[in-house]
Amino acid sequence: MIQEIPLRGLIQKPKWFALVTRSRAEKKVAERISLQWNTFLPLYTQWRQWSDRKKKVEIPLIPSFVFVNTTERELSAILKDDGVVRVLRYLGKPAVVRDEEIEVLRLFTINKDLIQTISPIDLSKGEMVEIVQGPFAGIKANYINHKGKYKIIVNIEATGTFYQVEVAINNIQKLSVSA
């Protein structure tokens, strides 16, 4: 149901806005503001390891963001929440998140077991990396990005042979200069 709010003779339709929250406050903020406004907090499931146990936890897909469907005029009331830092802005105005983008995030949350976030790594072709997960963990090699696939070139110096291995980007880390 679309709520229309009259504003000086104009009807203002609610739009999606991105709220920036305090660190790790997304769930509480979403819970509090959902009492009055339509909110959306995309979550995904991840296994977390503690010293004594392993547990499946739900984590925000986009850290420090909660989406709210409201009018621009009502944003000032929402910004009074303790956990809300600000509203995301674009060209000096609150940035509107398109309905299509919210639907993509909803699809991600429905299929959350298929989603895996990766940390961005600034790599250049030929840089040295180490494979940190998977069957090739521990191998140090040269990085190549070829047609959207991440490939590692392994050089076996003793025999003068080279091998190419396809590895997920989240399974590698950049080696420091001293390595």
Image: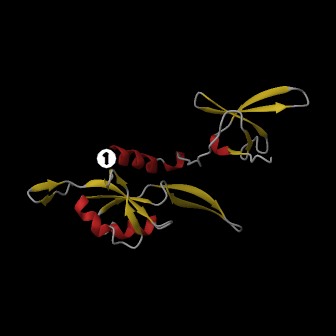
Identify which residue, 109 or 157, lies in the foreground: 157
| 137, above or below 85, in the image | above
Snapshot quadrant of residue 56: bottom right
Residue 60 image offset from top left, x and y in percent: 49, 58
Residue 32 image offset from top left, x and y in percent: 36, 70
Residue farthest toward the front in the current orientation of the protein: 92
Image point (78%, 28%), residue name: 163
The N terminus sits in image quarter: bottom left
| 102, above or below 25, in the image | above
Image point (31%, 67%), residue name: 78
Q: Which residue is mark 1?
A: 99
Identify which residue, 15 or 72, lies in the foreground: 72
Q: Tag 1: residue type?
A: Asp
Crowding near pointer 1: few (<14 within 10 Å), some, many (20+)?
A: few
| 33, above or below 91, in the image | below
Whether residue 36 is visible, yes or no, is no
Residue 73 image offset from top left, x and y in percent: 23, 62
Locate residue 142 relative to residue 22 in the image: left or right: right
